[in-house]
Amino acid sequence: MELWNIFDKEWVPVGTWVETALQWVVDNFRFVFQAIKVPFDIVLTGLEDGLTGAPDLLMLAIIVLVGWQAGGRKLAMVTGASMIAIGLMGAWEESMVTLSIVLTCVIFCSLIGIPLGIMAARNDRFWTVLRPFLDLMQTIPSFVYLVPIVMLFSIGNVSGVIVTFIYALPPVVRLTNLGIRQVREDMVEAARAFGASQRQTLYKVELPLAMPTIMAGVNQTIMMALSMVVVASMISVTGLGQMVLRGIGRLDMGIATVGGLGIVFLAIVIDRISQSFGVSARDRGHKKWYETGPVGALRKLAGKG
Amino acid sequence: MADVEIECRNLWKIYGAQEKEALKAVQSEGLSKEEVRDRFNCVLGVRDASFSVNKGEIFCIMGLSGSGKSTLVRHINRLIEPTAGEIHVAGHRVDTMGEAELRKLRAESIGMVFQHMALWPHRSLAENVGFGLEVRDVPLAKRRKAAEEALAAMDLQGWEDHYPDQLSGGMQQRVGLARALAADPDILLMDEPFSALDPLIRRQLQDQFLGLSRKLKKTTVFITHDLDEAIRMGDQIAIMNDGVIVQTGTPEEIVTNPKDAYVAEFVKGISRVSLVRAKTIMSPLDGHNPTSKTVPLDSELGEIMDQFMDDQAPVTVVDTANSAVGIITITDALRALRG
């Protein structure tokens, strides 16, 4: 061997090691990962059946009403127009599948990410340990873990949710941590001074005050989940992403465009709705949520009648 | 002797990982604040503070920022854990109290007002004021009633469903006071409550609080960096510097008899006209003949000065039985005025 070109030879066979390790995990612990799949599967199947099974117009009405409730009439019009555009392009069914995947992902990200964020805000050491993992989850190219995910969880929509979950979890943890840490110290002190326990302080003072920041994190999570749908379609996740992937595979510009536009419109709808959940009560003029939107209108009608 | 409501004995607070070691070294070697910082990387917050507050009295703790006064007051409801020392509140040992008992004490017996109000922006005024009752699971209707009463006591009736950001600074601090009073506690801790307000509003709130305090007779610990305010409000004043209580006494004692140069520097600019009383500046009668001009023992310097308007003959001080006990010359009065 030539001394000048010592790197022609592979000295450290990282690839082989990883392959062996993965194979060992798959052989011995696949049942663990299959068990992890169960809760994701239940939620996803429920949502998917509900969203795709319901009549299109009923779903459209529900989404517009949610938009109206969350952000007023203007948002209702934006969501209505976007969803009608998706429907007219013939991507309704696919968009409902994608929506259910994104929603499942958000549910699990919030369920796990918000408590993690709270714990991180309480404990500096935990935060120091957690941070490199979050960095890793966010920066490692998702293609890299597609293969192990497939081997451990097999292919399909549920695995797609898990891949998306890994990629989309960090922002909600980060922003929950930030939001709780940013609560003014004298607000927390005042709660303690009036006899609140740690739990009461969390629920009555810290979480409500951190809510706009936490919701910004949830919004980020949603956006990252949406950006994963095309990548996830490579492990046979159905929905809008698959339209795009099929378009690329067949060089069919038409279907790729429809899928892409569908993702954009869906992103607009989910982004605006989730952003308006994060608007603080102060900026809404201190109206309770049930005093505005369709619910407020109904209550007014009921009150008059 | 009056009943003691709050008492702290030999209270120490050292911040830092090595607080116990630092405490030992300070106690045995008498290290200074800087030595503690350099040797143990600890900050000396409160140094061997002892004081007692009688029932119904307003006790002012005065000191510049960083003197440890806010740290000291937070030991009374143990928002800050002491490094060493005893804290007695209304017959209970606060420093050894369990968590549940401590929460009960905070919610039911001690109200607190904060410098920057610390009202919760997401809660209506009624929800802010009723918080102490809410955490004790008092039913909503009762909470609401207590909040309405407390707000009414601070002239804020009708504002229950507004939010803190809709109020001016002065009104916000009145809500802060209402919140502290809502559970009808025996003790009020006030951490520079009026410092963030403009002078006119501050004056109004001081008067309103004094009036209320006379009526309700709450034992109050009042923190301030303003000696004028301390003199106006306090029955007793403790002056703090670098974590140490330098001097404790009535306003008159502090002003007329400062213990060291630090306190003297503070009281230099204070007007003595309504503070110094006849009994402090009079000299014994021996030798002098009582004059026709008389003032009672506890008359203020201002009234004594009035006696010298027409002629400069000495003034005789008389006790309640109207017998002469001392004499004040114009020189005495001028000297007292100058301090």
Image: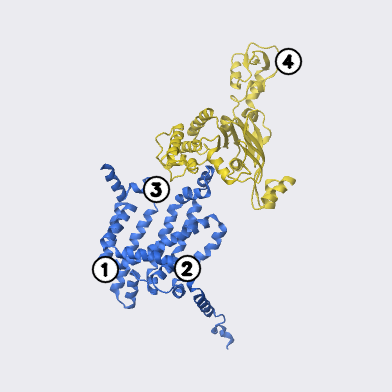
Chain colours: A blue, B yellow
Mark 3 and mark 1 lie on one chain; the one further toward the N terminus is 1
- Mark 2 → mark 4, Cα distance in angstroms: 93 Å
Task: State which chain disc 3 sits on.
Answer: A
Q: Work out how far the residue at label 3 is from the one at label 4, CA to CA, in angstroms.
A: 76 Å
Q: Residues within 10 Å of mark 1 (few under 14, many from 20)?
A: some
Q: Are marks 2 and 3 in contact (CB under 8 Å)?
A: no
Q: Is residue A252 above or below residue B268?
A: below
In terms of image quadrants, where is residue B50?
Answer: top right
Chain letter belonging to callout 2? A
Which residue is disc 2 drawn over?
A139
Q: Mark 4, chain letter? A: B
Find out whether the residues at labels 2 and 4 contact each other: C-beta distance under 8 Å.
no
| Residue B111 visible in rendering | no
Amino acid type shown at disc 3: Ala
Q: Is residue A90 above or below residue A201?
A: below
Q: Secondary structure at mark 2?
A: helix
- Kindly identify the amino acid type of the residue bearing the numbered disc 2: Thr
Q: CA distance from mark 1 to mark 2?
A: 35 Å
Residue B120 position, x and y percent, is: 46, 44
Expressed as whole percent of the image width and height from the top left, the position of residue A124 reads: 56, 57
**Tag 4: amino acid:** Asp
| Secondary structure category for the residue under label 1 | loop
Q: Nearer the viewer, mark 3 or mark 4?
A: 3
Reading the chain from its start, which is encountered first: label 2 or label 3?
Answer: 2
Q: Residue at 44%, 54% (x, y): give it.
A: A213
In the rendered image, which residue does mark 4 sit on? B286
On the image, the x and y values in percent for residue A216 come to 42, 57
